[in-house]
Image (tube, rainbow, N blue to C red):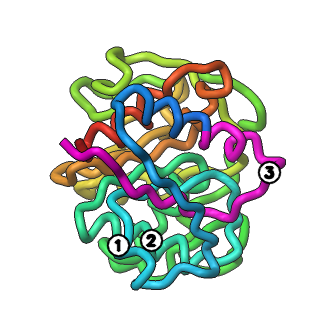
Amino acid sequence: MKTSVRLALVGDYHCAITAHQAIPLAIDLAAQHFSTEIHADWLATDNITPEILQNYDAFWCVPGSPYRSTEGALSAIRFARENRKPFLGTCGGFQHAIIEYARNVMDWQDAGHGETDTEGRLVISALTCEMVEVKNAITFIPDSLAARAYGRLEVEEGYHCRYGINPAFQTALEAQPLQMIGHDATGEVRAIELPGHPFFVATLFQPERAALKGQLPPLVAALIKSLL
């Protein structure tokens, strides 16, 4: 069993972002739970290089998009996916995991984000209803990584986002090995995972917020457990 873990937090830190306040608490709770040292570094997206990525055991692409460098965030996600490094994406991390997959697996080089792009296949677009500081129910498919992490199929989690998967491209995404494993009551996708990867999970919701109440977020625990 590893006694220490090197975790990259991919995103541009800002102390006013609630999720960024919760993330260090979630990491501390995971370290205590597993009696493991977790060395976590914030990687500003505009400073990410291939050499830096080699230093980490796992990656968490955190909320706070638009990132200063979309390409920096996408390069980290691609590195984790291709090198089978455990990966968690939350909120903006979910959105960019979809874009990275569309560009580099589906070969949609013009895949983009409706918040920052105006042309191409905008696989991420504005939600029909904004999910800003609200909670909502999510249903996971049985035996998914997320369902096993939570120990149940239905959960309620908090959001702070305005963008999600563009319904126009959902069918094409669903035809891929990438699995849509969490949905809200209207059927909109709220979580994905990549079968065959040791741990590759992304959620539009922000599970890290549980740490603000002193609770270890199940998906953070599952991320660290995948390394031990």
Q: Earlier in the sequence, mark 3 or mark 2?
A: 3
Above or below, 48 relative to 96: below
Work out how far the residue at label 1 is from the one at label 3, CA to CA, in angstroms: 27 Å
Work out how far the residue at label 3 is from the one at label 2, CA to CA, in angstroms: 22 Å
Res 129 seen here: no
Characterize the local packing of mark 1: few (<14), some (14-19) or many (20 or more) Cα atoms within 10 angstroms.
Answer: some
106 falls in the magenta region: no
Residue 208 is situated, as x and y percent measured from the top left of the image, at: 57, 35
> Which numbered dot is residue 15?
3
Residue contact at pointers 1 and 2, CB within 8 angstroms: yes
Left-right relation of 119 to 134: left
The quarter of the picture where residue 212 lies is top right
4 falls in the magenta region: yes
- Which residue is found at the position 31% from the left and 53% from the top? 86
Characterize the local packing of mark 3: few (<14), some (14-19) or many (20 or more) Cα atoms within 10 angstroms.
Answer: few
The residue carrying mark 1 is 79
The residue carrying mark 2 is 76
Q: Earlier in the sequence, mark 1 or mark 3?
A: 3
Segment tinted magenta in the rendering: 1-24
| Residue situated in front as seen by the camera: 190 or 222 | 222
Above or below, 71 relative to 217: below
Q: Residue furthest right?
A: 16
Residue 91 is situated, as x and y percent measured from the top left of the image, at: 59, 48
- Which residue is found at the position 26% from the left and 58% from the top? 176
- Which residue is found at the position 54% from the left and 60% from the top? 41
